[in-house]
Image: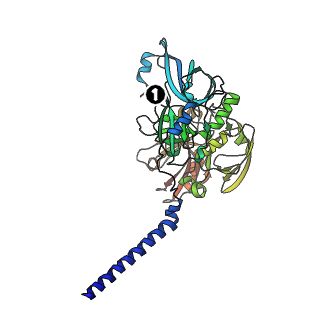
């Protein structure tokens, strides 16, 4: 019996020792391994704020309700981001009723905004006050004021309006949207559906969202409830600072709202306040991101940089010596990885400033000094010419002629254009399209159909070759084809 008890105690000690060793290993992994470092967790901070009351009490007095009256003819535009006709520009009733002799009526709209200084300047969305005949601002206290438009920027959907100065105004502080982290708590304050000073809370769901509203899309996505009427209201961080301007929702989406980052808005607000308009820098190039095929074609590792797809004659890039197919990798020491980064940086530069641009050309780095010009919103149009026709790989090509250029609405000055693609052909399978301009074959420049035929002739049967093409309104593409016949 004693032997049995003894053995039982030994077994218990072994189990206890094994448990201690296991516990020690678990703690070692949790507290030492960098992937699960629990010391990095802010234990003193609650995962959910206990209350948003103090934040709402502090910020709400600076948030205003904006009501506008617009004279509309036959229905007119509505809020660009919040409301849309189900048919858009293709509305089948538009032609039936026509645009003439339609009665005018007054459209009343609601939005939000926030006071940024004691002089009475208020930030809101452009679509809230655009084309308004009358703008009324109502404070949290119930006081109402007439407001005037100081400046508007449709490209970022930001506007600045003003009411009379008053030292008693509550104002908000503009924070740092770059410091926002995904998962961080934020609060939206505004007047959804006319319900004044509504406070909703959520987290930052994503940053840098592109929703197709314009060339400067860089939205903060949040699940804090945003609805019609929230437009122009502030998105607040837990320190009580404005980190975004609530601007858009997705039709039919729930829990998905978008705000313009306040760091983007700061420069726009400053220019609107000082000049009444926004002036943006202009480089004079068409650009696109570098995809895997493009990176392989140019020998650029890691897909870093932005490809120049077009250089506009007489503009800053052209004067500095930048050419199509250069890959821009840096602007004044700041690395460039996407076309949106380059667009944002150039747009924010003062007109007349001289910058240094680093780019790859034929695998070698080059530096260009470029004097920034003023961006004009007008499109540049170019005309072209020449003759010939050839079919291979199911792809019909021709030299550009004035007639072909007009018919296909192209902007090239020279080259070989795809005028047709046969169904179920290799060309169709690889994604070649009508209107594509063939610029190179295996790095050999192609200007005429004769050069195209000569380049194809040099490819051996069974070999794969690359076709470098330019697609209207899309940029450059690399297509790989295989020569199956002689």
Residue 477 seen anywhere in this rendered image of the structure: yes
In terms of secondary structure, where does tag 1 sit? loop
Q: Position of residue 330 (x, y in %)?
A: 67, 50
User: Crowding near pointer 1: few (<14 within 10 Å), some, many (20+)?
Assistant: few
Answer above or below: position of 76 versus 445.
above
Front in this rendered view, residue 372 or 300: 372
Residue 472 seen anywhere in this rendered image of the structure: no
Front in this rendered view, residue 323 or 194: 194
Front in this rendered view, residue 167 or 360: 167
Answer above or below: position of 347 versus 450.
above
Residue at 46% of width from left, 16% of height from top? 98
Q: Is residue 328 left or right of residue 135?
A: right
Q: Position of residue 297 (x, y in %)?
A: 58, 55
How many numbered circles are shown? 1
Q: Position of residue 484 (x, y in %)?
A: 46, 56
Q: Residue furthest left?
A: 1
Q: Quadrant of the N terminus?
A: bottom left
Residue at 60% of width from left, 50% of height from top? 337
Answer above or below: position of 282 versus 428.
above
Front in this rendered view, residue 277 or 67: 67
The residue labelled by disc 1 is 195
Q: Position of residue 240 (x, y in %)?
A: 57, 40
């Amino acid at each position: 019996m004693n032997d049995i008890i003894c053995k039982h105690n030994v077994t218990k000690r072994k189990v206890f020792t094994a448990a201690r060793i296991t516990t020690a290993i678990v703690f070692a992994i949790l507290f030492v391994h960098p992937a699960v470092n629990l010391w990095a967790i802010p234990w003193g901070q609650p995962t959910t704020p206990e209350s948003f009351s103090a934040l709402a009490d502090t910020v709400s007095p600076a948030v205003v309700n904006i009501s506008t009256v617009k004279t509309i003819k036959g229905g007119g535009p509505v809020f660009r981001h919040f409301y849309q006709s189900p048919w858009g520009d293709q509305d089948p009733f538009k032609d039936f009723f026509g645009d003439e002799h339609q009665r005018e009526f007054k459209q009343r709209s609601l939005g939000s905004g926030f006071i940024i200084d004691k002089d009475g300047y208020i930030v809101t969305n452009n679509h809230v006050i655009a084309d308004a005949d009358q703008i009324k601002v109502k404070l949290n206290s119930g006081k109402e004021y007439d407001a005037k438009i100081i400046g508007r920027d449709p490209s970022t959907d930001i506007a600045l309006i003003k009411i009379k100065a008053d030292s008693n105004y509550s104002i908000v502080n503009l924070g740092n949207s770059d410091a926002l982290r995904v998962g961080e708590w934020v609060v939206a304050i505004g007047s959804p559906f006319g319900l004044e000073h509504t406070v909703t809370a959520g987290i930052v769901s994503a940053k840098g969202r592109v929703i197709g509203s314009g060339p400067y899309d860089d939205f903060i996505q949040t699940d804090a409830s945003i609805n019609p009427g929230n437009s122009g209201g502030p998105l607040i961080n837990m320190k009580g600072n404005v980190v975004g301007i609530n601007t858009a929702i997705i039709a039919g989406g729930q829990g998905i709202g978008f705000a313009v980052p306040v760091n983007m808005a700061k420069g726009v607000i400053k220019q609107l306040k000082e000049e009444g308009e926004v002036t943006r820098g202009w480089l004079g190039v068409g650009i696109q991101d570098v995809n895997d095929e493009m990176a392989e074609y140019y020998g650029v590792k890691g897909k870093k940089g932005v490809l120049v797809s077009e250089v506009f004659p007489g503009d800053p890039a052209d004067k500095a010596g930048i050419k199509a197919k250069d890959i821009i990798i840096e602007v004044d020491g700041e690395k460039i990885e996407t076309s949106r980064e380059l667009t944002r940086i150039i747009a924010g530069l003062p007109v007349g400033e001289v910058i240094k641009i680093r780019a790859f050309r034929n695998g070698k780095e080059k530096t260009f000094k470029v004097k920034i010009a003023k961006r004009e919103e007008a499109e540049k149009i170019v005309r072209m010419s020449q003759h010939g026709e050839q079919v291979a790989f199911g792809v019909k090509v021709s030299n550009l002629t004035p007639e072909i250029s007009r018919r296909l609405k192209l902007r090239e000055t020279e080259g070989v254009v795809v005028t047709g693609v046969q169904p179920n052909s290799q060309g169709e399978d690889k994604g070649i399209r009508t209107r594509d301009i063939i610029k190179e074959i295996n790095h050999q420049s192609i200007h005429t159909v004769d050069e195209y035929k000569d380049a194809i002739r040099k490819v051996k049967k069974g070999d794969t070759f690359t076709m470098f093409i330019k697609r209207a309104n899309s940029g450059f593409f690399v297509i790989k084809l295989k020569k199956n016949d002689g």
